[in-house]
Every structure is written in C-alpha cells, then in structure tokens.
C-alpha cells in the first residue's frame, strides 16, 4: 500500500486510553488522518498508517484544555507564550481569560494567536483594553468609563468561533468596592446581549461572594472558586456556604484558576470532603511576580489526583468538561472518531512529589503526570527527550 493510499497518517499504539468523554479507560490504539481522529480500536495495524508510535505502558488522553490562562504574549506584562507553556504540559487548547478587551482583541486574534500551534480561544474582558494596564495601574476597572457594553457585544458577535464569553475581575485591586456591582451589571448585560457565558474572577472580591454569585446562571464560570480569601466558598465553620451550593445546583461552573495564589489547599480539601469537587481544572498561567509559584496543567492534574480525585475525574475536568463549558464538546475534549486529532501522552511517574500553594500548604503525592508527547490536529507538536527511547513500531 503506497503512502497516498494509507488509511491513517499516524497511530498511537499500545497505550492506555483514558477518555472520559467516551467512558473509555483501557488499552486502545488511536489513529489520525487529515487532522482528525480516524479510528479508535483495540488493535489497529501499523500497515494502515504512514507513521506509528509505540506508547506501550503510557497513558493517552485527549488534548488537555486550559479554561483559564493568559496568552496575549507581548500584549500585556504578564501573558505567557502559549506553545512554551501549553504543549509541554499536554495542553492543545488554551482559553485566554480576559487579557484583551474590544479595543485590542483584534491584535491578539490576528497577530498573537496565529503564531502558535496551540489552539487559542478567548473570553473578552469587560474593560476595553483587558489587562494591558494592570502592571502600572493595578487593575483594569478603576474608571468605569473604560467599559462599553455595546462595543464589547459587537466584538463578541463578530468573532463567534474564537470568543466564548465575557470576563470580569472582582478583585479589590481591579475594581473599587463602590463600583464592583456596576461592573458586574455591565458584564452580565454584555454576556446576555452576546448570548455567551460570563466568567468572574472571585478571589479577593471587594463585595460579598453571595452578591457576585447572584449574577451567575447555568454555564457561567466562577473562576478561582477555591481561593482562601475571606470571601471564599466556606463559612466560618469551614462548611460550604448555602449560596455556593445554590449556585452549583443551578449549573454555575466552579473552576480552579490555580495561579498559586488563587487556590488554597485547605479550601479544596474541605470542599472535596463535602462533595464539591472542581468542575474544571485550569492554570491561570501567567508570568508571576517574584515569590509566586504557578503550575502547568500536568502538575495540576497530579496535584488534584494527590488530593483524592480519581484519574478519570482530573482528566475529565481538563478535557470533556471544559469543552462542554465553551460549547465545543462536539469538536474537542474527546478522541471520538471525527473529532479534532488532539491528544497527550503521559508517563505516570511514581515517587514522592510535593506541590505548594501561596498560603504555606503542601500536597504530597506519589504519582506525577509527566508529558511525553503532544498531538495537535494529528501532528506531533511537542515531545520530551524521553521519547527517544520509545521509537516507532
């Protein structure tokens, strides 16, 4: 059979597929053709493919989706280079959480996003220039004249394949207490008029968390939900607040948005013990100030697994669940035949590993997701040095 007649371009062979979107956890081969998944079966002959990679003993997952990162590289003082921070951690889709607003989104869309192999999408900041001024002004909403609901809505509607909602930061450095509710009203209006989701930064909110949650409905996202600030999801007795339970019951997404400083290990432990795990795991990856520890997605999967979530749960929270949040679960987040050919291959390395938060709490674990290979649209876009020992079939 000539190269032109091959049924597949690439096969990942002999790996263990963990794909919660298909309820699969077992030995499976995965094949790709023309950028999509072309077959998933217990045995796919290498003779049918141009290339085959042996991933025996390794874990294969759909490409991870980071629902909250900052990828306007060069456009703000804190945004990272997506390929350098995503592909090496198994992330094939990164969602920028409000780095730009309606005035500067075009530059991010036209010049920054196309320069990356990572699929990049966005939530649009309710402020006109997003986070561009944060490093000098400390926040984007000190002067509410920077908000224009109609222009925000127009920008979202003009970019239906790349913008999936509105982002607003409820943080005391970003918006004054007396303006916080006005900013929430504007963000809610923009989300409703555009027919998209609302993502709210809730860590360090200048107004009570229940007041913020009142603005959120089914499918909206409370990011940094597990922070350890005074206005957290817990009451003074470390019980989940009734308003938080009510928000979860009506479908509000509780997103990690880790960032080191916005996820408190003790808050997570209390939430898990009371039956409220995170819906989605995300990094809030950014260039941190001195002294702050941030983690990539493979380490966050490892950390949350060490805190008691199953392998299925951590992979689901970073694949099919975030895909569903942005309404792309028919395209990404699973390795079903016909979906995007995005996959990650991990070595589950055993040992003693420690992860930290900025409140001085540690998490000890004995398994770490070490990324070996990242596939985007059926092509190898990143591989570790360890892959040299794996070879082709």
Image (cartoon, rainbow, N blue to C red):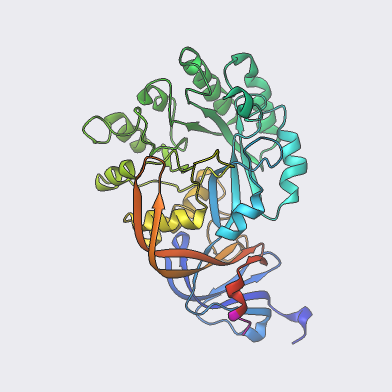
Q: Is residue 373 left or right of residue 16?
A: right
Q: Is residue 148 visible?
A: yes
- Residue 345 appears at what percent x and percent y? 54, 68
- Residue 154 appears at what percent x and percent y? 69, 27
Residue at 60% across, 85% down:
45
In the depicted view, which residue is nearer to us: 155 or 193?
155
Main SS of residues in magenta: loop
Residue at 58% across, 74% down:
386
Where is 131 relative to 208, above or below? below
Which portion, as a residue range, is magenta? 389-393
Q: Is residue 281 left or right of residue 373?
A: left
**Quarter of the image where the N terminus is located:** bottom right
Q: Is residue 309 visible?
A: no
In the depicted view, which residue is nearer to us: 213 or 81?
81
- Residue 343 appears at what percent x and percent y? 57, 64
Q: Is residue 376 left or right of residue 41?
A: right
**Quarter of the image where the C terminus is located:** bottom right
In the depicted view, which residue is nearer to us: 168 or 10?
168
- Residue 311 appears at what percent x and percent y? 39, 62
In the depicted view, which residue is nearer to us: 54 or 306?
306
Q: Give yes or no for residue 329 being in the magenta stretch.
A: no
Residue at 62% across, 38% down:
78
Residue at the extreme left: 237
Q: Quadrant of residue 261?
A: top left
């Amino acid at each position: 059979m000539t190269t032109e007649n091959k049924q597949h371009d690439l096969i990942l062979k002999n790996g263990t597929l963990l794909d919660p979107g298909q309820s699969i956890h077992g030995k499976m081969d995965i094949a790709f053709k023309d950028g999509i998944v072309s077959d998933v079966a217990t045995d796919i002959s290498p003779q049918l493919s141009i290339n085959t990679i042996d991933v025996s003993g390794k874990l294969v997952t759909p490409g991870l989706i980071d629902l909250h990162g900052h990828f306007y590289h060069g456009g703000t003082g804190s945004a990272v280079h997506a390929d350098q921070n995503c592909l090496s951690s198994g992330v094939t889709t990164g969602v920028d959480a409000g780095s730009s607003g309606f005035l500067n989104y075009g530059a991010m869309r036209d010049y920054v996003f196309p320069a990356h192999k990572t699929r990049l999408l966005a939530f649009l900041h309710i402020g006109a220039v997003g986070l561009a001024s944060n490093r000098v002004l400390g926040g984007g909403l000190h002067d509410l004249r920077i908000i224009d609901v109609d222009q925000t809505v127009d920008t979202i509607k003009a970019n239906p394949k790349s913008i999936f909602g509105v982002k607003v930061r409820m943080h005391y450095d970003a918006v004054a207490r007396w303006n916080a509710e006005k900013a929430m009203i504007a963000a809610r209006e923009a989300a409703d008029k555009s027919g998209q989701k609302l993502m709210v930064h809730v860590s360090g909110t200048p107004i009570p968390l229940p007041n913020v949650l009142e603005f959120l409905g089914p499918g909206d996202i409370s990011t940094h939900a597990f922070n350890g600030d005074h206005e957290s999801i817990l009451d003074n007795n470390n019980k989940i607040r009734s308003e938080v339970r009510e928000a979860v019951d009506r479908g509000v997404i509780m997103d990690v948005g880790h960032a080191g400083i916005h996820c408190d290990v003790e808050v997570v432990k209390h939430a898990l013990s009371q039956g409220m795990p995170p819906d989605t795991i995300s990094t809030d990856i950014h260039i941190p100030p001195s002294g702050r520890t941030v983690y990539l997605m493979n380490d966050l999967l490892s950390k949350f697994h060490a805190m008691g979530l199953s392998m299925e749960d951590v992979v689901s929270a970073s694949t099919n669940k975030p895909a569903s949040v942005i309404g792309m679960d028919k395209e990404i987040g699973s390795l079903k035949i016909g979906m995007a050919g995005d996959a990650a291959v991990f070595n589950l390395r055993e040992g003693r590993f420690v992860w930290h938060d900025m409140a001085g709490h540690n998490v000890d674990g004995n398994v770490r997701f070490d990324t070996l290979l990242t596939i985007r649209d059926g092509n190898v876009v990143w591989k570790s040095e360890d892959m040299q020992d794996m070879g082709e079939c």
